[in-house]
Image (cartoon, helix red, strand yellow):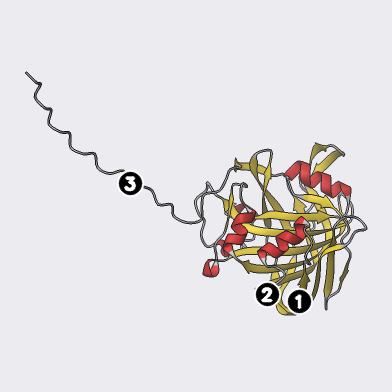
Amino acid sequence: MGDDFFEVPMTSVRTTEGPVDLPIFYYDVSVRQLNFFVDYGAALSKLEGTGLVPCKVINGKAVACLAFFNYRDTSIGPYEEVAVIILAYPGTFKDPKFYLANMFKRDGHKWTVGAYVLELPVTIPAARVAGREIWGYPKYLTDIPFTLSDRRFEYAVLDGPGGQPVMTVECVPGPGINMTGTDLVTLTNHEDTILRTIVDVDAKFRMGMCKELRIDAGTTDHRFAQNVRDLGLDRLKPFSMQATESFRSRLNKGWPIAEQATPPPPYPVKVKVPAKKAKKAKKAPAAK
């Protein structure tokens, strides 16, 4: 995309903290994203009641991601963010199959799946309020200390501003290949609907593996740490890692696509077939 990337029509949306102009613009961002194959049953349990089901990919696994965003310059101010997401689709929709192919489609409008955001701590109130009230993202305010370079990165999510770590990550990236980034699609629950949001992306990523990785979610009962442990992200080896220092994006208004409802079970339901109706017995002659 050219220099006109941010030249798009704007609208204003009211929040409890004042108006927010949409799309929200992200001008200068670094991203690190770890992608995992996780247990399908564990992912399914995290989507209970959302109206979404996990995408079942290689060997019956689901896909979960742990992403770290260093937003140096945005239209709502600089901040940090960490996301735990699960690749999913609405349970009332036809199973789109070939899920991973979506992740290589440049245009998010062509995606048939999306990222359900399970956790999304942020470091400024403006991001928390806008995320929760406009899209239904599970944002909460905390501190996210980090160090970031080409050779390694370290992140920590605290249990609150000035609190204790509930998760720490240390990673040394391995070799990789350069590739063009794709748009992002998120699926959230907002006002009893499933909201589909397109995030237009302009970025070049380095796709590779982790040379060294340590994720520690401790034993705390904090929800963020519990979700990391339940999905096994602190024990599994990611199948890929994406990194960029030149991420730009537009976070657009979302659109309702379905009602929020409990997703169907992930296995065929045996339906009891009623027995054939018995032949009517001959009517007995009336007694004389």
**How packed is label 2: few (under 14 Cα within 10 Å), some, or many (20 or more)?**
some
- Residue 166 percent location from the top left of the image: 82, 62
Q: Secondary structure at mark 1?
A: strand
Residue at x 80%, y 58% (from the top left corner): 3
User: Closest to the observer: 70 or 34?
Assistant: 34
Q: Position of residue 143 (x, y in %)?
A: 89, 58
Q: Of discs 3 and 2, which sits in the foreground?
A: 3
> Picture quarter containing residue 69?
bottom right
Q: CA distance from mark 2 to mark 1?
A: 8 Å
Report x, y in % for residue 283: 13, 28
Disc 2 on helix, strand or loop? loop
Q: Which label's residue is closer to the chain start, 3 or 1?
A: 1
What's the amino acid at mark 3? Val
As helix, strand or loop, the secondary structure at mark 3 comes to: loop
Which tag, 3 or 2, sits closer to the chain's start?
A: 2
From the viewer's perspective, is 115 left or right of 119? left
Q: Is the residue under label 2 in contact with that under label 3 (CB below 8 Å)?
A: no
Q: Residue at x 89, y 64 (%)?
A: 145
Residue 126 in view (yes/no): yes
Counting residues from the N terminus, which is met first, the one under dot 2 or under dot 1? 1
In which quadrant will I find the C terminus? Answer: top left
Question: Which quadrant of the structure image shows residue 26?
Answer: bottom right
Horizontally, residue 184 falls left or right of residue 30, namely: left
Which numbered tag is attached to residue 237? 2
In the rendered image, which residue does mark 1 sit on? 213
The residue furthest right is 162
Q: Nearer the viewer, residue 231 or 111?
A: 231
Residue identified by numbered label 3: 273
